[in-house]
């Protein structure tokens, strides 16, 4: 279970004593993150990313991902993350005339160099999580602005990513949903990420798949669970989160309704 030591609104420090599978996650804001101890797997649309202690990462906004956080033997997994919120970026864009000069086409999960400016910045954050005194919003905002300026100094091309305030472009619905149906996020998130209003998403979805989104998602997740239980020798507890369910009871009930038997019976009935 995750055990955050301190959580502020935009500067977050987490410690974990056991392996933590966070499940699906919608990254709504750019996040600059420094992994202090342990290792981490991150599954994104472009594949699996592996990180180790000492790695500095930038996770771009408007993407789905799945985190697995692995502590070192007998110790804690430790990470500090700074969220680069839209309001701060908009304010800096207006004040300093920062803007996206071209469409950013690079990876949306970046491993950054261990530049002295970045390392010293994260070192400067220690007082924010080593004391129980809350930092003021003004002080946090100053550190977020500093992080953005350092990123632009270390990697100037990031201006095209950080200061692009457009919503996701409209994309082909079918391949996107086939890649991402296992993420348990609300339908309006899928609509937003595919560049559609909720009403347009539902209409396009019905046309593409011949059924409403909720019904298709349930069907896909249950069939994927059945496949995993049968072919990978996993237990129901091993698969229900991986296929997009948050609650085991709901998963078990839906599985039995769809197949006529509980997930625990798959191996016996198909052996």
Image (spheres, rainbow, N blue to C red):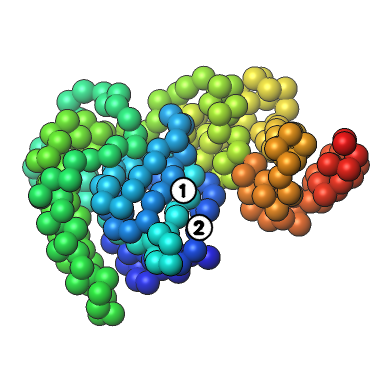
Q: Earlier in the sequence, mark 1 or mark 2?
A: 2
Q: In the image, is 150 to the left or to the right of 88? A: left
> Is the C terminus in the top left, top right, bottom left or bottom right quadrant?
top right
Q: Determine whether label 1 and label 2 are within 8 Å by CB.
A: yes
Residue at 19% x, 72% y is 127
Please state the horizontal and vertical placement of residue 193, each as a whole percent of the image. 47, 34
Please state the horizontal and vertical placement of residue 159, each as a whole percent of the image. 18, 34
Res. 173 image quadrant: top right
Q: In the image, is 244 to the left or to the right of 156? A: right
Residue 201's label in the rendered image is none
Q: Is residue 32 above or below residue 126?
A: above
Q: Secondary structure at mark 2?
A: strand
Residue at 37% x, 56% y is 38
How many C-alpha atoms fall within 10 Å of the one at disc 2: few (<14), some, or many (≥20)?
A: some
Please state the horizontal and vertical placement of residue 152, each as a whole percent of the image. 13, 40
Residue at 20% x, 68% y is 126
Residue 67's label in the rendered image is 1
Q: CA distance from mark 1 to mark 2?
A: 8 Å
The residue wearing badge 2 is: 20
Q: Nearer the viewer, residue 258 or 191?
A: 258
Res. 82 image quadrant: bottom left
Q: Nearer the viewer, residue 186 or 66?
A: 66
Please state the horizontal and vertical placement of residue 175, each as a whole percent of the image. 56, 22
């Amino acid at each position: 279970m995750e055990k955050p030591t301190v959580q502020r609104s935009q500067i977050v420090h987490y410690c974990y004593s056991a392996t933590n599978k966070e499940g699906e996650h919608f990254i709504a804001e750019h996040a600059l993150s420094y992994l202090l101890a342990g290792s981490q797997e991150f599954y994104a649309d472009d594949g699996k990313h592996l990180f180790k202690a000492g790695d500095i990462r930038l996770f771009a906004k408007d993407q789905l991902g799945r985190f697995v956080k692995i502590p070192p033997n007998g110790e804690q997994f430790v990470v500090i993350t700074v969220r680069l919120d839209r309001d701060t970026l908009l304010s800096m864009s207006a004040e300093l005339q920062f803007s996206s000069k071209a469409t950013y086409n690079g990876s949306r999960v970046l491993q950054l160099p261990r530049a002295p400016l970045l390392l010293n910045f994260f070192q400067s954050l220690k007082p924010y999580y080593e004391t129980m005194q809350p930092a003021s919003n003004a002080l946090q905002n100053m550190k977020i602005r500093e992080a953005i300026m350092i990123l632009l100094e270390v990697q100037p091309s990031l201006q095209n990513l950080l200061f692009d305030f457009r919503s996701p472009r409209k994309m082909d619905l079918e391949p996107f949903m086939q890649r991402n149906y296992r993420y348990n996020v609300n339908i309006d998130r899928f609509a937003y990420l595919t560049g559609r209003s909720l009403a347009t998403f539902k209409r396009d979805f019905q046309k593409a798949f011949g059924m409403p989104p909720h019904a298709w998602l349930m069907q896909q997740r249950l069939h994927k669970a059945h496949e995993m239980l049968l072919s990978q020798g996993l237990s129901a507890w091993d698969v229900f989160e991986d296929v997009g369910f948050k609650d085991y009871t709901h998963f078990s009930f839906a599985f039995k309704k769809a197949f006529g038997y509980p997930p625990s019976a798959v191996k016996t009935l198909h052996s």
